[in-house]
Image: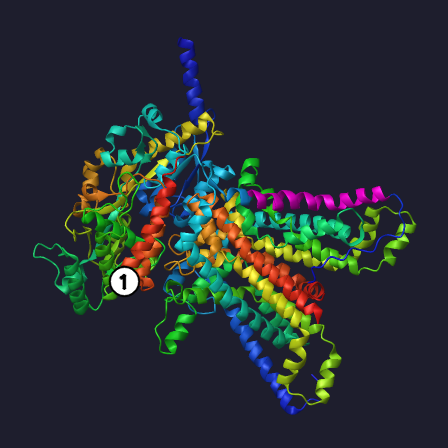
Amino acid sequence: MNATRSGWALWGDRLLLAITVLVAILWFLPVLWVVTMSLKPNSELMRSTWGFIPYPFTLQNYADLVRLATVPRWLTNSLIVAVGMTILVLVVSSLAGYAFARLQFPFKRTIFVLMIAGLMIPEQAVFLPLHQMFADWGIHNTHAALMLPRVAVPIGVFLMMQFFRAVPRELEEAAELDHASRFTIFWKIMLPLSVPALTTLGLFTFIHAWNDFLWPLVSATNANMYTVTVGLASIQGNFAQTQGLGSIMASAVFASLPIVLLFLIFQRFIVAGVAMSAGK
Amino acid sequence: MHHSKALAALALTTALTAGGAAGAAEIQLMRFFGDCQNEYGNVNDASQANGECGIITALVNQFNATNEGGHTVVVQTADWGAYYDLLTATYQTGNIPDVAVMHASVLPDFVARDLVTPLGSLFQEAGIDTADFVPAALQNASANGEVYALPFDLHALLFHINMDLMQQAGFVNEDGTVRLPTSPEEFIQMGKEFEEKTGQNYFATESQANEGMMVRFFNSLMWQQGVDVISPDGTTASINSPEGLKAATFIKQIYDEGLADPNLDALGADQAFLSGQAGIELIGTWMVDNFNAQAAGGQVALKNYAVANVPNLFGQDAVWADSHMWVVPKDEGRSPEEQEAAVAFLKFLNDNNFQWSRTGHLSVRQSVIDSPEFAALPHRSSYANTAQIARSLPQTQNQRAIYNAMISDITATWLAGAEPQAALDSAQSQVERILRRSNRGG
Amino acid sequence: MTAAARPATRSPRGRSRSRGWLTALLFLAPFLAVYLVLLVYPLFLGIWISFRDWDLMAGDYGPVGLLNYQDLWTDPVFWRSTRNTLYFALLTVPSMTIIAMLLALAVQGPGRIRAICRSVFFLSSVFSVTVVTLVWQMVLAPDRGLIAPIVQFLGFTPVNYLGSTTWAMPAIVVTTLWWGVGLPMALFLAALGSIPKELYEAAELDHASRWSVFWRITLPSIRHTVILVIVLQIVAQFQIFGQPFLMTQGGPANSTRSLVQYIYETSFRDWLVGYGAAMAMVLFGMMLVFSMLQLWLGRQGDDR
């Protein structure tokens, strides 16, 4: 790290790094193992599941998966729900966040405190009444029903408000002199500035939506509306009894691919975004 | 007259050749039994399939390929443990299936809330003869003098036996039949002797808290002592009675004496039995066909397979039983064509009841039971009278909740070292709370 | 995160104040609509349902007063589930915090190797709960798992972890740690990155040991983040559902049944929505206490 460091410290650093790498490898082994199993024939897995090299090798598990089309359908549902929910959360949160950061209106403080109180309402306290409400409205088994309960997240509003507050006022005041409307200022000046904040909020919403389990479990009861998480749970129950182990592992790997790709593309934003939202 | 008849004939021919134009419907079937599309997705002949999953998959395929109405059955499967949660949720979320499988023990919940279609007159129109159902099955499917379900089987617990290990232990009589214990004391003592001579476990069953095979055994032992776990009017429970203590103490003793491995889950128990690590497996009728095929196939250590009724250990012959049935859930949005298709499918299932009984389940149709082909199925003579000794809880609501409460507490006696009396008291108090709920004014 | 609201300074110009309100309302409307309809109303509906005998399939049987709450008092499974939830949180929260901090310290800094390690530790948290539990059910399996051969090599008999009342919960905790350590680690990384370099340079001149630098500089500097992580973890782990639901179904012998799972089962398996709603309210109350604790702790930190 530093040339003035003594030799002991340097060796200490290297040792720590070596241990870290070892832990990382161990951390990654389960993932590697699952990928390996997904590339082995089911008959081989009946004999033994041991080993990290896919030999004998087969792509049959993945071919079956695509042929049966159930997993691709779950993937599509998950994508629609996750993307839709992300867009809704971003729109709703940035609009409200801007209002709390920069606009004047009566009862502002009261409304703000009420919103913050909403942070303490856990999903489990409302999922039963929500389920009854959605049943009365007849909207279960739609993509909208899977998105809506998670749109009302005060934390998103809070994050966007924090961000907008940090933007220097001068940027807006110039536009105000030009008699630009509030929405124009928001749309043309504030939103472009808030791309990092939007990316962070968007990524976390996306991951959250993708991994949601309890709500889709009780709302999407039609197999055509399953998300990946619920769909996989539905075949995991009788695993190895009627389905081959390799097929199940292949579905798990296949279902994880989009989110892993997304993660690899956006990972630097995640850490940067966490830094931003936690640095307050 | 003549003219219209010709027209009708023409219409019929068109309907048949066009693969069903008028009146053809697509209906939703919801069931457990597993998903085996990979193996049986293309099998259109039920007689070519084996096992619960295979046979029901092939039956649906066969119906889709051959039914005259041109109807199509679309299947949604759910894991056994999640099935009723899912079926329940469909009433809220709107995709109510047109046909669904249901245990006799669950039917009262649905009948009490008017959630299933009465089928008596529909059966009559379709030519399903309810008089052919054995009395117990018809009673399971009925409430208040109306039929609400098509009974499909009667399934009970059995002792599945590895005869080679029994031979080794010296428990085979001269006539080739197996010698089974006649009292709890003898059970333990024979078990110890068995383990000494063979080095394997005497007994194996699903012992984790998932399926509660031992709760079914517990209930069987209660009936063997002449006690109903739930009173016939469904108001009181006698789980923590002296008889209950005797049964629970015996069950705990089986594990404490090392006669059974408490770590086995459902799959593990089957594996242990097939690989010759257990003399007896306690599981239901549905495994008979499977075990028989495996033993004949020669790939597993189990070579010489036999079946027996759960023996009488406490005085009376009795064994736990339940019944798979098919219901038509009530749905205001269902069209007459869909209802007709649903009944046509039920009729098809009833006509092919024999195929289902090949799994090892007992048929519910007297005509099938009396048929020579049924008698020719393997091992059936060994448990022919199971239907006579089969017992079920009275037709009360919330049996699933009762069952689950009992599973948690009774499995705790060997999994968590709970004292039998304490476990039974806990189960008793929970079941009383459930019974109070199910006997409310509503 | 500071929760205190500070109203923005009033606009110096008072022009068309009512138009300003209207604009603000338009900006707030979407949020207020979803917030009121999908969070506030259901909360009060839930409270109302918890005082009624509400059947999932047959609807409302009418008011029962406090019966649902009385039943909770004498329901051993409810208490067991509450205890399990607390036990799970007690095992998970401290270990998660410590491991996340250690990992953050280990992978912080420049270099490709550390960057890859960062990715690896974070990667596991993007998998869905179904995939995570599937992987760990396999890893923990006594007959064909990853751990069994190692245990055997060391001369012990492999344990059926998920089938043992002693080991099932710790096994679920390990699964949760593997799954969830990414986010707190990222939080710690962010906090570590914002410690002024000068502090370390001063310590280096003093020839302070690595250990004392950690205790004297690093830990005090990230104090706020430690509290944040602990509170976030408490809130998250209280809501545990998927892992035991998929791995052990709450067994063996109720040893892993969580409160949320019991709420789900009571409502959707036993159809007792009123009773389930009462439990949900108790969970809400418990989490409210911890959220208040968060506010209080946050304020304590700010006073210094």
Q: Position of residue B36 (x, y in %)?
A: 40, 48
Please name whichever residue, B287 or C244, is drawn nearer the observer in this view of the structure: C244
The answer to whether one can see residue A42 in this image is yes
Residue at the bottom extreme, as displayed:
A7
The magenta stretch spans residue B249: no
Looking at the picture, does residue C231 appear above or below residue A14? above
**Residue at 66% over, 57% down:** A203
**Residue at 67% over, 69% down:** C301
**Residue at 65% over, 91% down:** A7
Q: Quadrant of residue B411?
A: bottom left
Q: Which quadrant does the N terminus of chain A fall into?
A: bottom right
Q: What chain letter is assigned to the residue under label 1?
A: B
Q: Which quadrant does the C terminus of chain A fall into?
A: bottom right
* Magenta-colored span: C17-45
What amino acid is labelled 1 in the image?
Ser
**Colour option used:** rainbow
Residue at the top extreme, as displayed:
B1
Label 1: how many residues lie within 10 Å, few (<14), some (14-19) or many (20+)?
some
The answer to whether one can see residue A73 in this image is no
Please name whichever residue, A87 or C234, is drawn nearer the observer in this view of the structure: C234
Residue at the right extreme, as displayed:
A177
In terms of secondary structure, what is the magenta stretch mainly?
helix
Which residue position is annotated with label 1?
Answer: B275
SS state under label 1: loop
Q: Position of residue A240 (x, y in %)?
A: 39, 56
Q: Position of residue B230 (x, y in %)?
A: 28, 44
Please name whichever residue, B91 or C271, is drawn nearer the observer in this view of the structure: C271
Q: Position of residue B185 (x, y in %)?
A: 15, 60
Total marks drawn? 1
